[in-house]
Image (tube, grey):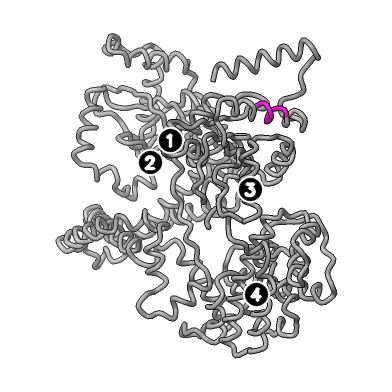
Amino acid sequence: YYDAVDAKKDRASKHSQTFGAKQPMHLGAGPGQDKNIWLSLIDMLRKKDQLPVVAFTFSRNRCDENASMLTTVDLTTTTEKSEIHIFFQKCISRLKGLVKILFATETFAMGVNMPARTVVFNSVRKHDGANFRDLVPAEYIQMAGRAGRRGLDTTGMVIILCKNQVPEMADLHRMMLGKPTQLQSQFRLTYTMILNLLRVEALRVEDMMKRSFSEFHTRKDSKVYEHRITQLSSMLASMEVPDTSRQLGDLQEYYSVVRELQEIRERIQRRVMESVNGLKALSVGRVIVVNHQEHKNALGMILQVSSDSANRVFSTLVMCEKNSMERDLAEERELNPAAAAEVPLPEDLLHMKLFLPEGPCGHTIKKLGPADILGITTKTLRVNAERILEDFRKRQMPRFRNDPPGPSAATATQELLRLAEGAQEGLPLLDPVNDLQLKNLEVVESTIRARGLEELLPGFQCVHSPLFHMEFVRFRERQQVLEELERLRYLLSDQSLLLLPEYHQRVEVLRSLGYINEGGAVELKGSVARQISNHELLLTQLLLDNALTDLRPEEIVALLSCTVCQVRTQVEPQLPSVLQKGIQHIRSVAEEIALLQRKCGLQESVEDFVEQYKFGLVEVVYEWARGMPFAEIARLTDVQEGIIVRCIQRLDETCREMRNAARVTGEPTLHAKMEAASNMIKRDIVFAASLYTQ
């Protein structure tokens, strides 16, 4: 690696001395320079007997360009030339390793088992449809693993072309030895799947979704959830039912108001912590109320704020007991972990009773996240934050652990203690609307609602009962168990499935179009759609609207190419009027379907749904079905030959499905036309046997 970096620097230095400043790195190598790089590389591989080689290039166009500029390179012997000539004459199924260099995209490494002695990466960056990025470990290993033929080579050579600068060592390490990409479920709901499963009584769509990998992380703990439900049910049965009679009759309603008030305050605080003004207020010296681990309603003072906006961290001096007492509290918390998760009593919401140490006051420094800050007070202290942090770090060392706190830390701790003792009912907090100027409608409405709930609480009769505190705690504990039971049962139910809302939306689309009835039974239109695996709604609508019946076979298959073509073309096709009208009709039908999907709740936009049907190969398929040679149809478009072949092959499958759908509807004319269309395109080189799989 370092040899490559040094060689690049030496070459750049010599170039600048001879010709002046070098061209900017981002411009890349020119065509002539690119050709020289490949010629030098191939010559080196030939001398070291490292051919054949697979050169991975992350662009189809660049693949063709690289292969075209090396047409003059002679890599075969006279004997091999003779064998190649015989191969083309007799159409042998294998090249027997006579190809010395193959330019391929990464797809070649995924599907065909054809290793080579050497693998070359034209680049280690690719465009993934959204932006350029480095190869992930799985991609690199899949392609680099083609180097070295089993039983023939002891090792395989992998070369990364550094046309400009050498990649960073950290990037290469991440690409070769990094953490594997996390598996993501590719399970998708389709209308055909839903219709097929609606016809089967033994298997529901919900059952299919449960078995998908997308639900694995939720369903893997189902046994644990069931066991926990059994435990909680037993616990609930043994609990004493709280008294809600007479003066305590409105206890349940009171509890609901307290819970709502707590949730609203948490929501407001989240918005405050996300706002610019809220973060500005959290400057060094600001006194805050902390709710972090064992520190409940404890006063703290901010000493340092991290610059990472995505994961903001506040280094805070927090008032606490002396260190020995703090350890005792930590041990107690470990013995009784449920205590920290209790819902606060009502008076803790109305009056934020601040923590006061029972013995000598001490302090600690914690790294807090936004969720650990319960409130931002109006108070600020003038302190030397750097000195406090330095003093605390020093006292973490074993040799200085017993040293007393420095003057700055001691002064800050005493100031916090003084504030807490002077405001047992809580310090005044910054108002999100008036002080922090948060004019967001949600914050304003939540603040008004919170004040209204605070005014309601004293008016309940239950708060005047002498048994209020005891019964409230009992009611709270019972409610917590009930809520946990409800949560676990929800996780085990169909309602927790990630794709369930989309399933209901798609069912509503099918019902609106008449594919199923109100009871979920499949109608005739649904039976037709079941025969089609892709774009079933569009093709079914076209078939049942008789939009294809009056067209000739070559016109039908040309229009259907929009369902298999996935590439854009810059060439404007020259189409007869009948095909132009057909394209307009298909787009109008697609738009109607897209609007209905949006109405039923699906998120895909109308534009995206309509634009997925691309008509760039309509002319190509039309002329191919009429018998034009492949060499001539390839000149009608800028789409690569391999993509044309793949589209026509997939189009044959679409023709078969449409033929079956026509049979279901009892359309012998369309059935015969689809059969004829399939025969028209199934000819010549497009359907020749593969060199790799035959």
Q: What residue type is labelled 2?
A: Met
Query: Real-space Cα distance between discs 2 and 1?
Result: 8 Å
Along the polypeptide, which appears first: circle 4 or circle 1? 1
Query: Real-space Cα distance between discs 1 and 3?
Result: 53 Å
Q: SS at mark 4? A: helix
Q: SS at mark 1? A: loop
Q: Mark 4 points at which residue?
A: 678
Query: Real-space Cα distance between discs 4 and 2?
Result: 77 Å
Q: Nearer the viewer, mark 4 or mark 1?
A: 4
Tell which of 574 and 594 is nearer to you.
Answer: 574
Q: Are marks 2 and 1 in contact (CB under 8 Å)?
A: yes
Q: Are marks 4 and 1 in contact (CB under 8 Å)?
A: no
Of helix, strand and loop, which mostly describes the magenta segment?
A: helix
Q: Name the residue under label 3.
A: 129
Q: Are marks 4 and 2 in contact (CB under 8 Å)?
A: no
Category of crowding for the residue at label 3, using alpha-carbon neighbours closer than 10 angstroms: few (below 14), some (14–19), many (at least 20): few
Q: Which amino acid does label 1 sit on?
A: Leu
The residues colored magenta run 36-40
Q: Name the residue under label 2.
A: 352
Give the side of residue 597 with respect to residue 420, left or right.
right
Tell which of 384 and 135 is nearer to you.
Answer: 135
Q: What residue type is labelled 3?
A: Gly
Along the polypeptide, which appears first: circle 4 or circle 2? 2
Along the polypeptide, which appears first: circle 2 or circle 3? 3
Along the polypeptide, which appears first: circle 4 or circle 3? 3
Residue appearing at x 43%, y 31% in the figure: 154
Query: Real-space Cα distance between discs 4 and 3?
Result: 33 Å
Q: Which of marks 1 and 3 is in front?
A: 3
